[in-house]
Image (cartoon, rainbow, N blue to C red):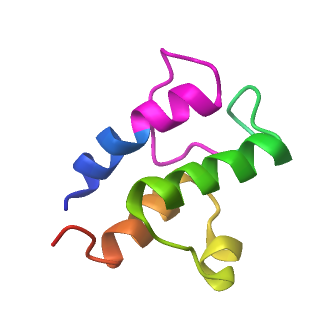
Amino acid sequence: MTLDSIKLDLQPIFATVFSNPNITITENMNAENVDKWDSVTHLTMILEVESFYTIKFKLKELTSMKNVGDMIQIISDRNLGA
């Protein structure tokens, strides 16, 4: 699973969660630079990503995520689909 393929997987999730079909996933995305990213959408996004990949992020992983790039890297490190 490549970082680009993970971005492609996340695209429809983010479009739905943030009610923005034109949203473009970047590694630097975070709550400070995405409209409608608040605590509720953050939790929804985490739950949707966990559901899609059938994983549960560890608390340590959740607290270390500073942006979408960190999430992508964590998913990649899990070697999902390999």
> Where is 64 relative to 21, above or below?
below
- Residue 2, how many percent across, how many down? 20, 58
Q: Main secondary structure of the magenta part?
A: loop
Q: Which of the pair 44/25 is nearer the observer?
A: 44
> Where is 38 relative to 6, above or below?
above
> Where is 36 relative to 21, above or below?
below
- Residue 36, how many percent across, how many down? 77, 28
Residue at the right extreme, as displayed:
39
- Residue 72, how many percent across, how many down? 42, 59
In the figure, is residue 77 to the left or right of 24? Answer: left
Q: Quadrant of the N terminus?
A: bottom left
Check if residue 64 falls in the magenta segment: no
Q: Magenta residues, as a range?
A: 11-30
The residue at 49%/37% (across/down) is 13
The residue at 82%/40% (across/down) is 38
The residue at 62%/66% (across/down) is 65
Q: Quadrant of the C terminus?
A: bottom left
Residue at the left extreme, as displayed:
82
Q: How many marks?
A: 0
Check if residue 26 falls in the magenta segment: yes
The residue at 53%/35% (across/down) is 14
| Quadrant of residue 32 within the rendered picture | top right
- Residue 66, how many percent across, how many down? 64, 62
| Quadrant of residue 58 within the rendered picture | bottom right
